[in-house]
Every structure is written in C-alpha cells, then in structure tokens.
Image (cartoon, grey):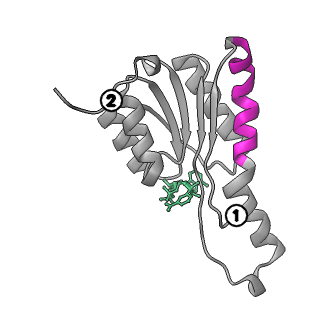
Amino acid sequence: MSGPALYPSLQDVPVVISGGASGIGEAMVRQFRAQGARVGFVDIQDARGRALAEEVGARFIACDITDIAAYQAAIAGFAEAHGDALVLINNAAHDERHDWSAVTPEDWDGRMATNLKHGFFAMQAVAPGMIRAGRGSIINMGSIRG
Ligand SMILES: NC(=O)c1ccc[n+]([C@@H]2O[C@H](COP(=O)([O-])OP(=O)(O)OC[C@H]3O[C@@H](n4cnc5c(N)ncnc54)[C@H](O)[C@@H]3O)[C@@H](O)[C@H]2O)c1
C-alpha cells in the first residue's frame, strides 16, 4: 500500500494560515486538512476562500490582513471554534515587482503592511496560547525579494 504520508501528531491540531484561498496557502490548507488538522484560514478572496473551506471542511474568514484588528479578531474566532492555534503559517503576501526609482513612501508602507507587518501581529495573537500549551510552530513565509 502506498499513498501520502500521514502524520498522526497533526490530527485535530488547530492551524491558522493567512492567504489560504489560493497558491501555496491553498495547498497548505488542503494538506493540513488531509492530516486531520483543524484549519482556519483568512484571505481577501472571499468566494474562493468560502468554496475551498466548504470543500475541505476548514473554517474561513474573509479578512484583509492589513487590517490588524480584524485579523486578530479572526484568529480569536478560530481559537473559539478550534482551540488555541498550535501552528501559525504567515503566508499571505503580494509579491509585486516595482521600479525602485518610482517607489513612494506610501508604496513602501503598503508593501510592508501586506508582506511583513501582519505576520508579527498574528504571532502576537497566537503566542499566549502556545505558551500555555508549552508548544507550537510558527512558520514565516517570505520572498528573497523582500
Ligand atoms: N511562489 C513562489 O515562487 C514563492 C517564492 C518565494 C516565496 N514565496 C512566498 O510564499 C508565500 C505564498 O506565495 P504564493 O506564490 O502562493 O502567493 P500568491 O500571491 O499566489 O498567494 C498569496 C495569497 O495571499 C492572499 N492575500 C494577498 N493579499 C492579502 C491581504 N491583504 N489580505 C489577505 N490575504 C491576502 C491572496 O489572495 C492569495 O490567496 C508568500 O509569502 C510568498 O512571498 C513564494
């Protein structure tokens, strides 16, 4: 018998993923669900996120991760439903290419908000639960472009 590897230690583990509606985030939503983890994910792509959540049995909250209060509230909502997150994957990003000579201070702040800032505040939201549990994993995705 062969098939995908199963990791029993992931069964029922609460996992939070940002940017889970498409791309690498979607693959992670699917794979963690296949391991029996309790997956909560956010994305700005509402329809796509809802369809994926229904298909795989995950929880989805439509959320722009640059809205830190809304994102931390979504993480609290996942914790209420699934228990405190023991895995956080900071995956959401928008890896746009820019002409360096045309970048404005507003562009800079926008890129930081979309690609970096949310990851810190997601960690701030999940860390107390991980400290209580005495374990947890935080995975920060990023591009060498950053
Ligand atoms: N694809 C690659 O080759 C590659 C290489 C190096 C690093 N990475 C990193 O891996 C991660 C995922 O990459 P990807 O290629 O799947 O990216 P992607 O652009 O395909 O997917 C990003 C996801 O984040 C969501 N998102 C974007 N802005 C958002 C916002 N403001 N609020 C909520 N959700 C938002 C998008 O809707 C999308 O579902 C990123 O952190 C990226 O930097 C990717």
Ligand 1 is within 8 Å of the C-beta of the residue at disc 1: yes
Residue where numbered disc 1 is placed: 146
Rendering quarter of residue 51: top left
Q: Is residue 20 above or below residue 60?
A: below
Q: Which residues are magenta?
A: 118-132
Count neighbours of disc 1 (C-alpha within 10 A) and say few if under 14, some if 14 to 19, many if 20 or more.
few
Q: Where does residue 27 sit, x and y in percent of width and height?
A: 40, 45
For residue 81, side relative to residue 84 (left or right): left
* Disc nearest the viewer among 2 and 1: 2
Q: Residues within 10 Å of mark 2 (few under 14, many from 20)?
A: few
Under circle 2, the secondary element is loop
Give the position of the N terminus as an image quadrant: top left
Give x and y (percent) for residue 88. 60, 33
x, y percentage for residue 95? 59, 65
Q: Is 3 part of what is drawn in magenta?
A: no
* Circle 2: residue type: Ala
The tag earlier along the polypeptide, 2 or 1, is: 2
Q: Which structural element holds mark 1?
A: loop
Q: Which residue is mark 2?
A: 5
